[in-house]
Image (cartoon, rainbow, N blue to C red):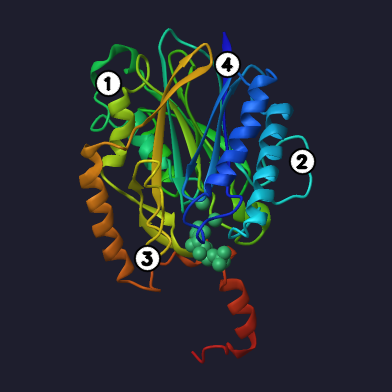
Amino acid sequence: MKITLSVIKADIGGYVGHSESHPECLAKAEEAMARAKKEGLLVDYHVTKCGDDIQLIMTHEHGEANEIIHKLAWDTFVACTEVAKKLKLHGAGQDLLFDAFSGNIKGMGPGVAEMEITERPSEPVIIFMADKTSSGAWNLPLYKMFADPFNTIGLVIAENMHDGFAFEVHDVKEHKKITFNAPDEIYDLLIFIGAPARYPLKAVYHRKTGEVAAVSSTQKLAMLAGRYVGKDDPVCIVRSQGIFPAVGEVLEPFARPFLVEGWMRGSHHGPLMPVSVADSLPTRFDGPPRVAAVGFQLAQGKLIGPRDMFADKSYDKARDMANEMAYMMRDHGPFEPHRLPLEEMEYTTMPQVQKKLADRFEPLED
Ligand code: F6R
Ligand code: MG
Ligand code: MG
């Protein structure tokens, strides 16, 4: 049985400020999803949130980039926006960049990650959701999961993973893509994905079988809108066990927090803190950036779960470390490397300030 797992998310308004999703908006999304399931459009669904982003996790038999499913997600976000407007939530409708739906939700603001798969006898999937960061935040953890034997021992000792994985990398500026094979091409791969703002990892494939292992959302909100409207707050679907890394190997990269771009005004570097869904409440300096993970077993498309994967004591230390890192970064105030490098600031206030001061810049004498 072929089943498509679609994760479509949007920030349709925050409460309070950009820190959380309002229960009434989530209830509205739940209502729309329940209706779609009853009508037979969806096999199953789960509505959740990460900070101020509403997450629609859907299973269906319509394939990827399907107009009906994308329109369902769009209409759901429009309905949630109406609730957000009524409650005067902050930034109501902020990720919906267009007035009307036009065939494919990609490019319209919301983030999208989808995979069509033939369900295995056991099909564990983990859906990662981040808030206050950009697409590209998954580069480091996906590399560790699928290419780093210090993270994933299965790459070394599990015969069915020993041939490695293929990584699809996007160039968001040139609108191009390239695929690298790991482990043979990891040095070439790393030179690109080590610059995640430009080269986000879109997908990972099991080389021997061609099976899709992971898919992420790579929509760049600022590039779509031509100005800063909010961070991408990306999602990522990862299949686990068997020919893929075990659940513990999939989660392991987040035990050691790393720096991502985002945080306050989308203009800072800060640690990505792994948290439970309930704790996805970016508050301190609008952050620090968060990642939550929900796990499911698929059963004929039914979402058995969720299990809140970071609601576990063994991530307490990672959260402490992230808080320490947050203090260290915050001490830099408006200075790099806390503040993003100039090129990354191009969608924030920098162009306006440059324009305002253009005729005050004089040539250097020597
Ligand atoms: C970052 C984020 C927030 C806002 C900040 C200003 O992704 O969403 O840090 O950028 O709170 O928000 P506005 O411009 O809506 O007042
Ligand atoms: Mg917001
Ligand atoms: Mg958000």
Compared to residue 126, the image places residue 88 above or below, namely: below
Badge 3 element: loop
Disc 4/disc 1 C-alpha distance (Å): 27 Å
Compared to residue 206, the image places residue 16 above or below, namely: below
From the top left corner, tell me how far across and down residue 41 is, in percent: 68, 21
Left or right of 39 in this view: 179: left
Q: Are marks 4 and 2 in contact (CB under 8 Å)?
A: no
Q: Are marks 3 and 4 in contact (CB under 8 Å)?
A: no
The residue under label 1 is which amino acid type?
Answer: Gly
Q: Quick one: label 1 or label 2, which is nearer the N terminus?
A: 2
From the top left corner, tell me how far across and down residue 78 is, in percent: 70, 44
In depth, the one of 115 and 153 nearer the eye is: 115
Residue that mark 2 sits on: 101
Q: Quick one: label 3 or label 4, which is nearer the N terminus?
A: 4
Disc 4/disc 2 C-alpha distance (Å): 24 Å
- Closer to us: mark 3 or mark 4? 4
Disc 1/disc 3 C-alpha distance (Å): 36 Å
Left or right of 342 in this view: 150: left
Badge 2 element: loop
Label at residue 154: 1
Disc 3/disc 2 C-alpha distance (Å): 37 Å
Is label 3 within 8 A of ligand 1 (CB to nearest ligand atom)? no
The residue under label 2 is which amino acid type?
Answer: Phe
Label at residue 338: 3
Badge 1 element: helix
Residue that mark 4 sits on: 3
Quarter-wise, where is residue 32 in the image? Answer: top right
